[in-house]
């Protein structure tokens, strides 16, 4: 069946431009310095037709113009074999999608044994159909994502994937043989990735080639970056507890029950239900190991490259995640291990009790980063009691923990009622844009500071005697955490 052309292609044909055909494909490839024999052209044309026929239903590629497909898909996939003729075999195409660069590369180099690795079912179904239709020996589909626990030996890895090089080098730790090669097909601006990967993997890989080239007769510039592996593959399946002091679990599927529970910790509801949170940052995790080792439940890393530190408690598990799963959990893109830890249960604040001396802070903020930043500021300015109103985001949301720099674990936090349920006679100093100037305020000896919520601000009953932070004309409001910080600083500077 001949694929239907796009409207753009039809317009070109009506203007006298050549229609898509195997001969036209051959002509274009020869312009790029790629010469295929008749059988190879027929195979590539057959693959092109199948890709076009399946794309509408499976959404396999964003490139639909025929000449662009030849340039950006087929020629781009083949040119690494011209840049580096000594491609090793077997060669694993990591994250092949609908088969690039693997299928065009295999057609060009039939001597190679190609493994097409892909985890998405619609694409693996397409790949299996393509392999069966092309009937090319030495072309296999690997129906899974590649993680450190994939241990089938290969002599080389090639990838057009957009993930950082360092992530890929970690990902292939279980399958790439000693002396094997990783070929990164990149755009011209990949220096930062190289600079990050080279020192991080200096013991395991060496950078042996960085070749800049251009697809002939086009403006498209490319880089082929090649690493060679110095060491033998890492056997990354679950290790017996005797292999180390931490029980180890390898997780490579997003359907894994543990991973599903970890994902729920991205929301305050999941944090509250599980009584746990995710913490990132070597300084903060080190402090938790030192101050609260019993809270630590699991060390979460990309594969087994970064083990738990020496001070980590022995009861803690080591969860080794496939790179794509870890990336899902890594809210801040640090690519550093995460710590799963228990959170404290908050005492309930009693509004009827007498106010303590000084300032007690009422927090209604719904943004976890505002909550975390406010708790950090309150601790720095010696606020003795911080009351999280029912509207507030969970103070142990991972974003709040990070914004607080860990002070949520040491602050005196209490669970409070809804803002609307605060007693009317509570000694409150409220912050509102319509209030009297903050600098003219004398703070009581005992009071509750109440900033407004993001957006809605304060209920009307608290605005009648509120204080305000003067702002330049045209500026409606300050960030909630910033406004609270200014008010607390003014209280510490002039306590009344």
Image (tube, rainbow, N blue to C red):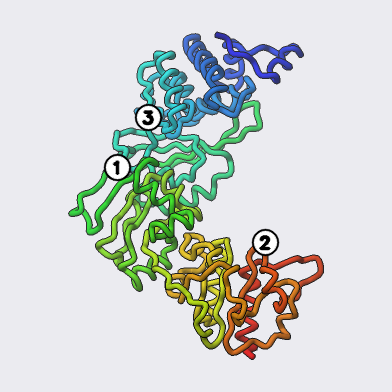
Q: Evaluate if marks 3 and 1 touch, with contact meaning CB atoms under 8 Å apart.
A: no
Residue at figure coordinates x 35%, y 73% from the top left: 291
Percent position (x, y) of residue 391?
Answer: 56, 63
Position of the C terminus, as image quadrant, is bottom right
- Among numbered discs 1 and 2, the one appearing first in the sequence: 1
Position above or below: 66 against 148: above
**Marks 3 and 1, Cα distance to the nearest angstrom?**
21 Å
Question: Which residue is denoted by mark 2 in the rendering?
Answer: 455
Answer whether residue 359 is visible to the viewer in this image. Answer: yes
Give the label, 1 or 2, closer to the camera. Answer: 2
Position of the N terminus, as image quadrant, is top right
Q: Label 2: few (<14), some or many (≥20) within 10 Å?
A: few
Residue at figure coordinates x 63%, y 65% from the top left: 453
- Among numbered discs 3 and 1, the one appearing first in the sequence: 3
Percent position (x, y) of residue 10?
Answer: 70, 15
Place residue 173 in its image quadrant: top left
What is the secondary structure assignment of the residue under circle 3?
loop
**Marks 3 and 2, Cα distance to the nearest angstrom?**
48 Å
Question: Which residue is denoted by mark 3 in the rendering?
Answer: 143
Answer whether residue 198 is visible to the viewer in this image. Answer: no
Residue 233, numbered circle: 1
Nearer to us in this view, 331 or 100: 331
């Amino acid at each position: 069946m001949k694929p239907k052309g796009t409207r753009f292609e039809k317009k070109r044909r009506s203007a006298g431009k050549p229609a898509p055909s195997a001969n036209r494909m051959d002509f274009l490839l020869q312009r790029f310095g790629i010469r295929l024999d008749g059988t190879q052209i027929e195979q590539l044309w057959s693959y092109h037709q199948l890709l076009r026929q399946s794309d509408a239903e499976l959404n396999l590629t964003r490139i639909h113009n025929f000449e662009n497909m030849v340039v950006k898909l087929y020629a781009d996939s083949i040119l690494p074999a011209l840049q580096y003729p000594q491609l090793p075999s077997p060669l694993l195409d990591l994250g092949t999608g609908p088969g690039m660069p693997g299928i065009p590369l295999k057609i060009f180099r039939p001597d190679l044994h190609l493994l097409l690795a892909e985890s998405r079912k619609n694409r693996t179904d397409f790949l299996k159909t393509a392999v069966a239709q092309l009937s090319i020996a030495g072309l296999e589909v690997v129906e899974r994502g590649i993680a450190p626990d994939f241990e089938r030996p290969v002599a080389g890895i090639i990838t057009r994937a957009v993930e950082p090089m360092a992530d890929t080098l970690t990902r292939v730790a279980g399958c790439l043989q000693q002396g094997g090669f990783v070929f990164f097909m990149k755009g011209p601006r990949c220096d930062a990735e190289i600079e990050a990967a080279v020192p991080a993997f200096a013991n395991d890989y060496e950078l042996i080639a960085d070749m800049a080239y251009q697809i002939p007769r086009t403006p498209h510039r490319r880089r082929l970056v090649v690493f060679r592996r110095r060491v033998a593959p890492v056997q990354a399946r679950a290790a017996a507890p005797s292999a180390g002091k931490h029980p180890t679990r390898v997780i490579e599927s997003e359907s894994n029950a543990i991973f599903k529970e970890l994902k729920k910790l991205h929301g305050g509801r999941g944090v509250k239900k599980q009584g746990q949170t995710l913490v990132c940052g070597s300084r903060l995790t080190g402090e938790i190991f030192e101050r609260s080792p019993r809270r630590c439940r699991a060390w979460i890393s990309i594969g087994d490259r970064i083990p738990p530190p020496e001070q980590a408690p022995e009861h803690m598990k080591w969860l080794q995640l496939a790179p794509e799963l870890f990336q899902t959990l890594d809210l801040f893109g640090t690519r550093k291990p995460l710590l799963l830890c228990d959170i404290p249960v908050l005492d309930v604040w009693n509004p009827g009790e007498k106010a303590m001396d000084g300032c007690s802070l009422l927090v209604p903020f719904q943004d976890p980063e505002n909550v975390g930043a406010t708790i950090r500021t309150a601790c720095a300015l010696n606020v003795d009691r911080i009351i999280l109103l029912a509207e507030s985001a969970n103070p142990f949301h991972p974003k709040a923990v990070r914004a607080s720099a860990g002070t949520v674990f040491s602050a005196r936090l209490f669970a409070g009622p809804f803002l609307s349920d605060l007693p009317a006679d509570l000694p409150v100093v409220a912050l509102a844009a319509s209030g009297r100037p903050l600098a003219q305020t004398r703070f009581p000896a005992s009071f509750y500071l109440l900033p407004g919520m993001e957006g809605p601000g304060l209920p009307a009953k608290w605005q009648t005697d509120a204080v305000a932070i003067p702002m330049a004309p045209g500026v409606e409001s300050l960030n909630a955490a910033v406004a609270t910080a200014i008010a607390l600083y003014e209280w510490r500077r002039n306590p009344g």
